[in-house]
Amino acid sequence: MITAIQMALVALLILISATPVLAKIDPSQNIAIVARMKKDFQGRVALKCWLRPCSIRADFDGDGKPDKAALVVDTSRQNKKGIIIAQGTGKSVLMGPGNPLGEWGDDLSEVSAWKVTRHGKTDALALTKDSAQGLIFYADGQFQFKLLP
């Protein structure tokens, strides 16, 4: 028979595992992204995990090379949250701070989920904010954003 204390502990474990933790990403696991952020963004962007997973690997630009998207904060812009996409070609793009995503603006703090999805022939990032869905995708040589119906 399960005691009240055991039930409370199980409930607490479920609550903890379901709650996203705001924690720094271990830089040793993301050495290439950290090096690119320092070079491309003069150290003003820091890896910061506020969703799970903290980073996503996919082929966003369709060149056959793996790209990596990671959650970040822009320390020069009141720690606004964003996404850095480090392409396999060596280029990096910051989505969010300084690069607004349409009506969603330049702070992705209210994004509650993200995942990889397909958009045409390439991978894309599907974002959820409140009840709205948005898509970061690569087209015409650049990353773009659109709201989904």
Image (cartoon, rainbow, N blue to C red):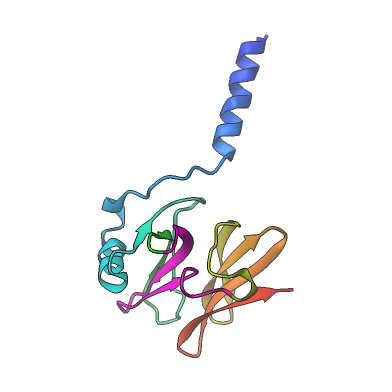
Question: Which of the image's four quarters has the C terminus?
Answer: bottom right
Residue 132: image x %, image y %?
70, 64
Residue 66: image x %, image y %?
38, 71
> Compared with residue 136, is residue 27 higher up or lower down, i.e. above or below?
above
Residue in the picture at 58% in, 70% down: 105
Farthest bottom residue in view: 140
Residue 2 visible at all: no
Residue 96: image x %, image y %?
50, 69
Residue in the picture at 28% in, 69% down: 42
Residue 121 visible at all: yes
Q: How many marks?
A: 0
> Compared with residue 37, is residue 139 higher up or lower down, i.e. above or below?
below
* Residue 126 part of the magenta-drawn span: no
Judge from the rendering whether residue 53 lies leftward or rightward of residue 26; answer left or right: right
Judge from the rendering whether residue 17 lies leftward or rightward of residue 84; answer left or right: right
Residue 144: image x %, image y %?
54, 80
Question: Which of the image's four quarters has the N terminus?
Answer: top right
Residues in magenta, as a range: 77-101
* Residue 82 part of the magenta-drawn span: yes
